[in-house]
Image (cartoon, grey):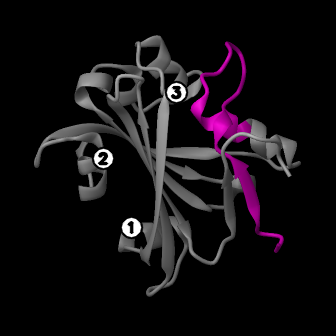
């Protein structure tokens, strides 16, 4: 694996955090001797992309709450992470506000009665759009991988569709459960 490889376990990102613990991303980066960082680019209502709209079961034109973050290990942009939530779940909550959510979205969702019980991840590839190229520092014609992670409650209510976009030249391995490498 190259020096740019990043093997990530999915499970810590899906588990609510204990009070006072930092977010899963910061802890993961620290375990690797790196500094985890992220910049909140947007929080509020927006129309979701088609794949997200379908995953969340939203009607055409129905808005969702979105939190768009730029993931920055050691201050280097490596991923766009957009989390979408149905308005019925996140409207009027801190998820819709442009500020840090203590414990992260998963912790707040659990507090609101929406504990994740099922996760489905779908990966696709394509060319980076103009906004993606700008945030990730990519040249025109660059390819990206898009991972769409849908989280549902035990009664199958979709509560979050996270769309993560990374340059296709990076090596990413997602692991659910088990021990880290």
| Secondary structure type for disc 1 | helix
Residue at numbered disc 2: 55
First reached walking from the N terminus: tag 1 or tag 3:
3
**Labels 2, 1: front one:** 2
Q: Residue at x 77, y 41 (%)?
A: 178
Image vertical order of residue 23 relative to residue 174, above or below? above
Magenta region: which residues? 1-26
Density class for disc 2 (Cα within 10 Å; few <14, some 14-19, many ≥20) is some
The x, y position of residue 83, in whole percent, is: 42, 42
Provide residue 52's location: percent of width, then percent of height. Answer: 31, 50
The answer to the question of whether label 2 and label 1 lie on touching residues, with beta carbons closer than 8 A, is no
Closer to the eye: label 1 or 3: 3
175 relative position to 180: left or right: left
Q: Earlier in the sequence, mark 2 or mark 1?
A: 2
The quadrant the N terminus occupies is bottom right
x 82%, y 46%: residue: 180
| Residue 141 seen in render | yes
- Residue drawn where x is 37% and y is 74% of the image: 130
Which residue is denoted by mark 3 in the rendering?
A: 106
Residue, disc 1: 131
Query: Whole-percent x and y of residue 99?
Result: 47, 29
């Amino acid at each position: 694996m190259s020096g740019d490889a990043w093997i990530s376990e999915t499970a810590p990102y899906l588990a609510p955090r204990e009070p006072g613990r930092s977010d899963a991303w910061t802890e993961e980066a620290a375990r690797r001797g790196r500094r985890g960082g992220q910049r909140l680019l947007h929080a509020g209502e927006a129309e979701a992309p088609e794949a997200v709209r379908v995953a969340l079961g939203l009607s055409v034109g129905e808005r969702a709450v979105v939190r768009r973050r730029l993931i920055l290990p050691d201050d280097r942009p490596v991923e766009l992470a957009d989390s979408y939530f149905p308005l019925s779940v996140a409207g009027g909550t801190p998820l819709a506000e442009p500020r840090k959510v203590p414990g992260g979205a998963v912790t707040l969702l659990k507090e609101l009665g929406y504990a994740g019980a099922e996760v489905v991840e779908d990966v696709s590839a394509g060319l980076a759009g103009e906004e993606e190229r700008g945030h990730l520092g990519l040249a025109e014609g660059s390819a990206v991988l898009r991972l769409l992670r849908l989280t549902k409650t035990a009664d199958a209510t979709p509560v979050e569709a996270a769309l993560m976009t990374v340059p296709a030249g990076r090596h990413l391995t997602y692991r659910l459960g088990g021990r880290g490498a």
